[in-house]
Image (cartoon, rainbow, N blue to C red):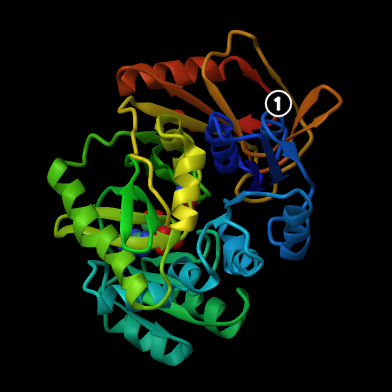
Amino acid sequence: MNILVIGGGGREHAIVDVLSRSRHADKIYCAPGNAGIAEKAECVPFKDTDVDALLRFAEEKHIDLTVVGPEAALAVGIVDRFRAEGLTIFGHTKAATRIESSKEFAKQLMEQYHIPTAAYRSFDNYKEALAYVQSRPLPAVIKYDGLAAGKGVIIAQSLDEADEALRDMLLDERFGQGRVVIEDFLQGPEFSFMCFVNGNNVYPMPLAQDHKRAFDGDKGLNTGGMGAYTPLPFITADDYEFALHHILEPTARAMVSEGCPLTGVLYGGLMKTKDGIKVIEFNARFGDPETEVVLPLLQTDAVELFYAIAKGGNMPSLQWSDKPVIGVVMASNGYPNGYKKDFAITIDPQYDGILYHMGTRREGTQLLTNGGRVLMVISTADTLDEARRKVYRNIEYIHCDNLFYRRDI
Ligand code: AMP
Ligand code: GLY
């Protein structure tokens, strides 16, 4: 098969990596890809949301399977457009992607189908929103309703802070159009439960935990994610069963009932609170960086799997290794705010493990930084402790003047 992967980060590197191991993969293209992906796929310089160009390319190259990484491409309806042309594509329709792209849609769905989540209300009126915050205990969780790459959530500890956030979101139009979801503050460890979903059929992946803050000890700004690991020692078998049978499976069924069945990955961002497991958010795609530690455990042929999810055909039996995996992100100084690019990266030959590229490019033979998150160093071992030691040893083999990483993944 000819395969096209859309996106160019560490998540897509992990996806290209598993696809490239399939006996069905002839030629793999990636748009736009990066320097690491280029070792396994031909990178083509299309933006992930340039659906017209991607569609023309897929037809010209006789692409048999397209796999979409980023939510932005899903939210502009790439899946709908490809399917209308008879192409097979892994990812959700625009309507189904609302489970991520609209916080209000997701909250309404959970309320209607009794899926456990924080109590909430949504507003487009500043005064009403402020009055609601005043009527509830602090802190208040205020979420901008729309795709905001994790940046549209404010946890306001005081009424002043809440007021400022509501003004930003509803009056100043800083984020574009204004609508917010305000929800109760929950506490507990968070974890990511990703499943492959085709309609009512839900196939779980190993659980992973992300580290969202920039610096050690969960200090600093929220980022796309600075590291991840699997399995999770704090999740019991009962927790797992509850999350699967009372959250992920009913959500897939709810989407079918709503007329927008899922045909890709459903990502539950879950929290283990003292009152049980609750949904913090859903994503309509593979998590990044969780995917980079989960997909290396996949033992099933990835092309067969992705094709079956996209088409609803025969599903291969899904097999996973249960080895611990840890991944640490190396990011450009300044990230998640502004940062410089084009710093040289060199890697010693002693490096031993998987290295996924998140934001790199090559000039001649020289590898250069080309993004906020640049590399993800991945190690597996028989125990999490050993995997952790290995990952930090491997980091020492990577040399670049402008990268930082967390030491506490
Ligand atoms: P979201 O974009 O909805 O995933 O929110 C980003 C982050 O904000 C989450 O990973 C949580 O750490 C935090 N958060 C979101 N909602 C809540 C909540 N109801 N209670 C506590 N923390 C939350
Ligand atoms: N790692 C969080 C996300 O992919 O949204």
In the image: residue 35, left or right of residue 23? right
The residue sitting at the top extreme is 350
Q: Where is residue 196 shown, x and y percent of the image? A: 39, 51
In the image: residue 183, left or right of residue 63? left
| Residue ID for mark 1 | 401
Please identify the quadrant where the N terminus is shown.
Answer: top right
User: Can residue 405 be spotted in the picture?
Assistant: no
Q: Where is residue 295 shown, x and y percent of the image? A: 45, 36
- Residue 232 lies in what quarter of the image? top left
Q: Where is residue 323 shown, x and y percent of the image? A: 33, 24
Query: Where 221 falls versus 366 (above or below)?
Result: below
Label 1 sits on a secondary structure element that is loop
The residue sitting at the right extreme is 364
- Residue 382 lies in what quarter of the image? top left
Residue at point 39% right, 49% down? Answer: 314
Q: Where is residue 299 shown, x and y percent of the image? A: 40, 30
Residue at point 57% right, 56% down? Answer: 89
In the image: residue 332, left or right of residue 309? right
The residue sitting at the front extreme is 314
Please identify the quadrant where the C terminus is shown.
Answer: top left
Mark 1 surroundings: few (<14), some (14-19) or many (≥20) residues within 10 A: few
Query: Where 191 falls versus 199 (above or below)?
Result: above
| Circle count | 1
Q: Which amino acid does label 1 sit on?
A: Asp
- Of 103 and 125, the residue lying toward us: 103
Residue at point 67% right, 34% down? Answer: 37
User: Can residue 127 be spotted in the picture?
Assistant: yes
Query: Where 186 falls versus 407 (above or below)?
Result: below
